[in-house]
Image (cartoon, rainbow, N blue to C red):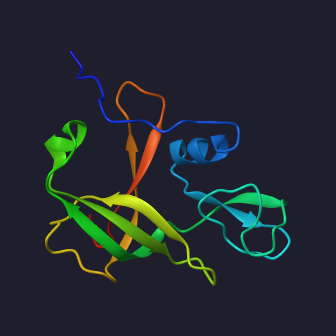
Amino acid sequence: MTATYVRPLPTISPQNQVFWDGLKERKFQVPRCDSCGAWNWSPYPACRECLSTDQTWTQVSGRGTVYSFAIVTRAPSAFADIAPYVWAWIELEEKPRTMLVQANVINCDPYALKIGDPVRIAFEDVPGEDITLYKFEPAGHE
């Protein structure tokens, strides 16, 4: 018998369907402005630099660095089995506009993680659901 997934799942809408479909294909995509070239995270109907509504979902490297983080030691019940865990802001390497993505950092000792550590995207297929989530892990993790 397979255990039921008890953590909250994202709401998929027509506006973000491309993003979630990309994760299933192991691609991390963000909107990129067709007018000025700015990367835009989190997804929004218009470019945050020039307000153009002409944006294209574009795959990024999935590499970044830890910008800031917190170690969660007292987690809500749905997450208690994975505590302590890291909730972090990851700065993606695509710039010039800073792109900070919120995510868990997995496959590491939470107490050894440091600001500036290199990380890379990791994908999690949710058991019993047709969805893939993203997380990050130390870039040297094998």
At x 51%, y 50%, the residue is 26
* Residue 86 place in picture, x, y as percent: 25, 61
Which quarter of the picture shows residue 106?
Answer: bottom left
Q: Examine the rendered structure and indicate whether residue 2 appears above or below residue 116.
A: above
* Residue 102 place in picture, x, y as percent: 43, 61
* Residue 75 place in picture, x, y as percent: 19, 48
- The N terminus is located in which quarter? top left
Total marks placed: 0
Is 48 left or right of 105, judged from the image as shown?
right
Is 127 left or right of 63, judged from the image as shown?
left
Pick the front one: 89 or 121: 89
Is 141 left or right of 38, judged from the image as shown?
left
At x 13%, y 71%, the residue is 111
At x 24%, y 80%, the residue is 114
Which quarter of the picture shows residue 14?
Answer: top right
- The C terminus is located in which quarter? bottom left
Which quarter of the picture shows residue 109?
Answer: bottom left
* Residue 60 place in picture, x, y as percent: 59, 66
Q: Examine the rendered structure and indicate whether residue 134 appears above or below residue 59.
A: above
Q: Examine the rendered structure and indicate whether residue 123 appears above or below residue 90.
A: above
